[in-house]
Image (cartoon, rainbow, N blue to C red):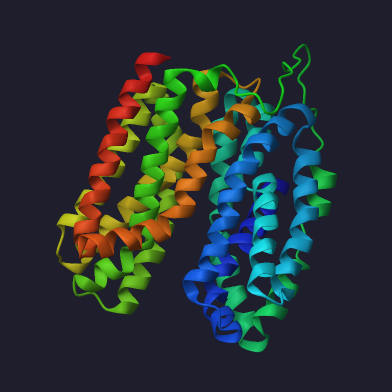
């Protein structure tokens, strides 16, 4: 329950509040929307890089110290965003927030659940991601309500007061090293042997390409749908339904694990990702079919979140999950951070959003081949 609450709050304050506040930030400061978004994306890239040493720290210190420290760091980072007098200070504050994200977002929570729950980790991770999926549902309207009465700076100061330090410090107390097991010590800066194997590299590359394709498709869905004739309101509602569809995918992941091998379900989910993007590229209507395709895309993306959370333990065990997951997830997180800019740039380069979706389909299609190849190098 503690991790459910802290995940909702951490994602809400550090991630989902930003797109709601973006217009207010640009209007007040005069900074361009691309520049403001670039600062946010830079924070996400820092979180990807910081996830590597933080994963090593998780293995040897446990989630209590790591996530409590991340919560403490998130407070001055959020205050720094609110009070930034110049764009340079704003950028630096987001870079600091990126370090906090690495310590309090899914990677740290998944490491804790993987070690604590062992063979039952899929059920535990599913439960946390189902609840954490409500972060946008809670914090998007909350941020909007605050902005109606406060400036964006005061809104971020108010959000900074919603701290998760006590829950992380007081609730994450289960023993970290199980009886009879001592995690091997490795230097945090040294690339683990597992991460140098072809199977690890191919699998990480496959999920990196998939993450870029799926996030770029999701975040450019509205212009694609409006080009297909849907109203702006219906397109926005469809994007919301895509997010809700992720819950369906997460609910279906546990039954999938009981019927497939790690390689089999990886290939299946990546192939389904390519198929969903292709379907959105090909469909021109009717609106109900486009909405259904968007929901299916969300469901596949939801399953992909759990795949990323569990595939490292499935293939390389749980003893050094934090370290291996840090190296494994770094390029995936970076790809997700670059997807908003990359999708928009690709649409301009190809001349239309449907054409851009076909290129994303090809990109994820390459990921299917890489995922299949990774199973041959276990």
Decide: is 28 above or below 118.
below
Q: Which residue is situated farthest in the top direction here?
A: 180
- x and y percent of residue 370 in the render? 32, 28
Give the camera-side residue of 326 and 35: 35
Decide: is 275 above or below 114.
below
Direction from residue 1 to residue 378 in the image, left or right:
left
Give the camera-side residue of 85 and 352: 85
Residue 377 occupies quadrant = top left
Residue 160 occupies quadrant = bottom right
Decide: is 304 above or below 374.
below
At 72% from the left and 16% from the top, the residue drawn is 184
Give the camera-side residue of 277 and 293: 277
**How many badges with numbers are in the image?**
0
At 55% from the left and 80% from the top, the residue drawn is 26
- x and y percent of residue 323 in the render? 64, 28
At 68% from the left and 86% from the top, the residue drawn is 150
Tell me, yes or no, if residue 8 can be seen here.
yes
Tell me, yes or no, if residue 1 can be seen here.
no
- x and y percent of residue 80 in the render? 74, 68
């Amino acid at each position: 329950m503690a991790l459910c609450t802290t995940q909702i709050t951490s994602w809400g304050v550090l991630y989902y509040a930003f797109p709601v506040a973006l217009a207010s930030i640009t209007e007040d400061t005069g900074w361009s929307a691309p520049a403001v978004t670039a600062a946010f994306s830079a924070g996400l890239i820092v979180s990807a890089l910081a996830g590597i040493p933080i994963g090593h720290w998780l293995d040897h210190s446990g989630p209590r110290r790591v996530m409590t420290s991340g919560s403490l760091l998130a407070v001055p980072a959020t205050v720094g965003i609110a009070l930034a007098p110049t764009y340079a200070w704003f950028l630096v504050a987001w870079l600091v927030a990126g370090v906090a994200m690495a310590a309090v977002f899914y990677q740290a929570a998944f490491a804790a659940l993987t070690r604590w729950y062992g063979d039952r980790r899929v059920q535990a991770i599913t439960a946390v991601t189902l609840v954490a999926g409500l972060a946008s549902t809670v914090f998007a309207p909350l941020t909007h309500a605050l902005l109606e009465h406060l400036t964006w700076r005061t809104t971020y100061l108010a959000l900074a007061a919603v701290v998760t330090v006590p829950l992380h410090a007081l609730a994450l107390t289960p023993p970290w090293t199980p009886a009879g097991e001592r995690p091997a010590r490795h230097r945090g800066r040294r690339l683990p042997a597992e991460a140098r194997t072809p199977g690890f590299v191919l699998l990480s590359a496959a999920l990196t390409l998939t993450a870029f394709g799926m996030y770029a498709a999701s975040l450019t869905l509205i212009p694609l749908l409006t080009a297909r004739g849907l109203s702006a309101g219906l397109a926005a509602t469809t994007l919301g339904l895509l997010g809700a569809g992720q819950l369906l995918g997460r609910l279906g992941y546990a039954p999938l694990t009981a019927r497939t091998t790690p390689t089999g379900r990886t290939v299946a989910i990546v192939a389904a990702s390519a198929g969903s993007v292709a379907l959105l590229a090909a469909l021109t209507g009717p609106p109900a079919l486009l909405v259904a395709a968007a929901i299916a895309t969300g469901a596949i993306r939801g399953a992909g979140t759990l795949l990323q959370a569990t595939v490292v333990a499935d293939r390389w065990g749980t003893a050094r999950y934090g370290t291996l997951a840090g190296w494994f997830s770094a390029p995936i997180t970076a790809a997700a951070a670059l997807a908003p800019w990359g999708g928009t740039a690709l649409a301009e380069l190809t001349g239309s959003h449907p054409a851009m979706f076909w290129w994303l389909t090809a990109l994820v299609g390459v990921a299917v081949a890489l995922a299949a190849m990774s199973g041959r190098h276990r």
